[in-house]
Image: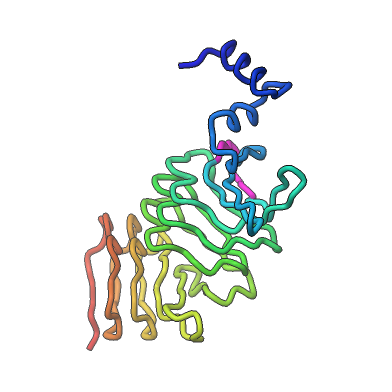
Amino acid sequence: IICISLLKHLIEMSGIDDYTEDSEFDLFKNPNEVMKGDFFFKINREDKTATLIEQRCNNAVVLIPRSIEHEGEEYIVTKIQEKTFYNTYMIKSIQFPLDSQIQTIEQKVFYKSRIESIIIPPSLFELQEGWCNNTPNLTKITVMPNNEHFMCLEEKMIVGKSDEKSCIYDVLVFVSRDAKKVKIPTFIKRIASFAFSLSLIESVKIPPHVTHIGEGAFYSCLCLEKVEFPP
């Protein structure tokens, strides 16, 4: 373990005038990984985009910025990396500005967190398989108007598309963890990974058109007593 005095000495030798948390992060990380406030980003200097890769937030509500500035350049935040909010207990809500350009939320982003709500902005078009794995407290997801990729049903379910060129929402992406009874719409063909996982679901009707149930879709649904397959 490097002591603080040695750390400062290394920073002085590197030409950095003042010791800050930003300096500490930049000294031992890839030069394309930068710290902005409570967030750590990996930037792509070619297409001027940024991926949120880590955070040190202690607030209950977290707002993901539309963009960051680094060395005089603007980088648009387009992705949240796997396990960025892993095992977080303080954060309860994830929000985005109306002009957010976020496109992808990777798998296990909120793994073992205590996230209760999230807002899906119009720009988001990819929720990777397993993005909601181990999110027992996630009970409210709001889909912003003008999002053409996801839709909220009955304030309990989030549905998406298997074919982005289609107008049919045939994938059950997520079910609120406090839902007890759910009747899956007849137009659903796929149930995504961990869609019901760790929920309070007691009974569910699965329509005959469902041809795929993803990994862990009903994992640890301890209250589930009845599953119906209507003809």
Q: Is residue 226 above or below residue 64?
A: below
| Residue 81 point in image, percent of width and height | 49, 51
Q: Is residue 10 above or below residue 137?
A: above
User: Which quadrant of the view contains residue 102?
Assistant: bottom right
Q: Residue furthest top?
A: 5
Left or right? Give the position of 224 relative to 96.
Answer: left
* Residue that appears at 52% across and 38% down: 90
Q: Is residue 169 above or below residue 176?
A: below
Left or right? Give the position of 197 relative to 227.
Answer: right
* Residue that appears at 65% across and 18% down: 13
User: Which quadrant of the view contains residue 144?
Assistant: bottom right
Quadrant of the rendering where the C terminus is positioned: bottom left
State the residue in front, 164 or 121: 164
Left or right? Give the position of 97 relative to 177.
Answer: right
- Taking the magenta stretch, the answer to whether it contains residue 120 is no
State the residue in front, 150 or 82: 82
- Taking the magenta stretch, the answer to whether it contains residue 58 is yes
User: Which quadrant of the view contains residue 121?
Assistant: bottom right
How many numbered discs? Answer: 0
Left or right? Give the position of 218 relative to 110.
Answer: left
Q: Is residue 107 above or below residue 83?
A: below
Colour pattern of the rendering: rainbow
* Residue that appears at 35% across and 58% down: 199
* Residue that appears at 67% across and 18% down: 12
State the residue in front, 130 or 182: 130
| Residue 187 point in image, percent of width and height | 39, 85
| Residue 45 point in image, percent of width and height | 64, 52
| Residue 173 point in image, percent of width and height | 41, 69
Magenta stretch, residue numbers: 55-63
Q: Residue furthest bottom?
A: 231
